[in-house]
Image (cartoon, rainbow, N blue to C red):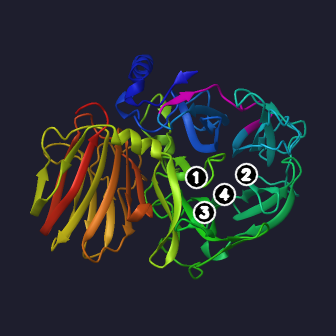
Amino acid sequence: MALSTNVPALAAAQATDTQQTAPLQGATPQWRPLLHYSPRRNWMNDPNGPFFYKGVYHLFYQYNPVAPEWGNMSWGHATSTDLLHWREQDVALPFSATKDIFSGTVVVDIHNTSGLGTADNPPLVALYTSVFKKDASREAGVQAQSLAYSLDDGRTWKPYQKDPVLTLSPDSLHFRDPGVFWYAPGGYWVMATVVANAPVVKLYKSANLTDWTFLSDFGPAGFVRPGMLWEMPSLFPLPLDGNEARQKWVLMLGINPWSIAGGSGSIYFVGSFDGTTFRPEGLPPDGSDPAAYDWLDHGADHYAAIPFSGLPENASMTIGWMSNWDYASRIPTSPWKGQMTLPMAMSLRTIDGRAQLCLKPDSHYTAWVAARPTLSFDGMRLSSEQHLLPDRVHGQVLDIDMNMHMQGADRAGISVRATADGRIGTSIVYDMKKQLLTVDRSRSGLTGFSDKFSHEHIVNMPAPTGDVSLHIIIDRNSIEVLSRHGSVVITDLIFPPAGADRVMAFSENGLTEFRNMKITLLDGNQ
């Protein structure tokens, strides 16, 4: 096993890994994330089956064990006790001569409904998509749902004797990504999966995780666009505004292409589920622009979001892949390619008269940040000018909490991972006239590795009184911006030069007061 994600407590392990990889031609340790999980080497994409059990968080993910490019799909595995310090484990479910291992879910079968464990040692059960190869008993490329289980807390996995446990008739090349949960009111398991190119979500039920019966389909035709794929469905309940008596159901999906920022992205629908059918509420009219739908993230680099299972009661958390299928294969990192978003707590809040999914950093992260020295700035007033924050405010990894009170300015914001001369930087800008929040990475550093590496990501965000609150998390190669209680999120990869570690505030064509700005330096530069 190898340490792979690197907060300061793991500095020694990180140094060892850097020494191992730095001699490789093209290695990029300057972009190895500090806060976000990345494998030590090779390709990674969608998270699979994250769960919490016996005090340990488990993360599985699509992984190529032999190369930094997509292929040989297997399940990588990492564990953590706090979602900050990750330990990369052995490959959990490896590809074979007969099949590749695509996405899926892990559940703790606490009551041993499957009969694969015992009452004293309940099994961990992985439901995943098998993609059969030409020398298997099926046509090459057929996708179906398979099962493996573990009786040693996820260290080793055994294939179930019946493989697969669920197929379509006739066979499908696009039947994948099972998301499984226990539906307590009915006393059975529910699986949400997709026929990706239809596109449609298909729901099934099972008493034992091995025998599945069809329930219903979900697929609002008004949202479908040419070539659109639906992937990674997750169906789960959340209380509205913290009221358990007002529970609603959320269906999250990966959309590729046609996402709000171009390429791939994560969308969600809020509605009801009666144990058989999911019914969304408040769908826009057929043919509406993608912006009319609810997106988990308005940036380019948040895909395949999936909830953790096994969390304590009333807790809900998600994690996603921080990349975009438009350019994932061209990301300029080496010897690894791919990383995760920060784990985020989820809630449903009534905003603008309707239920919206909100994200916020997990409590492990917020407690860790709170324990570190913070620099505070309050009452900084800028009028049609830009201001480089003092020399002591510099770092490649930052947490920034701030409020802008715009008093006549057309636009205001900050530039992070910036050079002192302002020529390089990623800008977070609020446009008061247009009521738009934008992350602009056009001058963020290296951008020319793909012509699909889009520059500006924009979300409509009303702020009629001119007050805009932002929480910004900057890592060595990424930025996550949250606002409006986390109902607005913009996640983007960036690839700045090492010297771009300053923060610059600005106000255009008028006055802006920056209030309660708190900057925590997370990479040891304070």
Q: Quadrant of residue 484?
A: bottom left
Q: Residue at 23% across / 39% down in the picture? A: 501
Q: Amino acid at mark 4?
A: Pro
Residue 315 marker: 1
- Alpha-carbon span between mark 3 and mark 2: 20 Å
Q: How many marks?
A: 4
Q: Amino acid at mark 2?
A: Pro
Front residue (pair 11, 174): 11
Q: Position of residue 377 (x, y in %)?
A: 17, 51
Q: Amino acid at mark 1?
A: Ala
- The correct choice, above or below, for 297 with respect to 92 in the image is below
Q: Badge 4 local density, few (<14 within 10 Å), some, or many (20+)?
A: many
Residue 225 visible from this viewpoint: no
* Earlier residue among tags 1 and 3: 3
Q: Residue at 48% across / 64% down in the picture? A: 260
Element on which disc 2 rests: strand
Q: Amino acid at mark 3?
A: Leu
The part of the chain drawn in magenta is 85-100
Nearest to the eye among marks 1 and 2: give it.
1
Dominant secondary structure of the residues highlighted in magenta in the image: loop
- Per the image, the residue denoted by label 2 is 178
Q: Position of residue 372 (x, y in %)?
A: 31, 37
- Alpha-carbon span between mark 1 and mark 4: 19 Å
Residue 499 visible from this viewpoint: yes
Give the position of the N terminus as an image quadrant.
top right
- The correct choice, above or below, for 386 with respect to 111 in the image is below
* Earlier residue among tags 3 and 2: 2
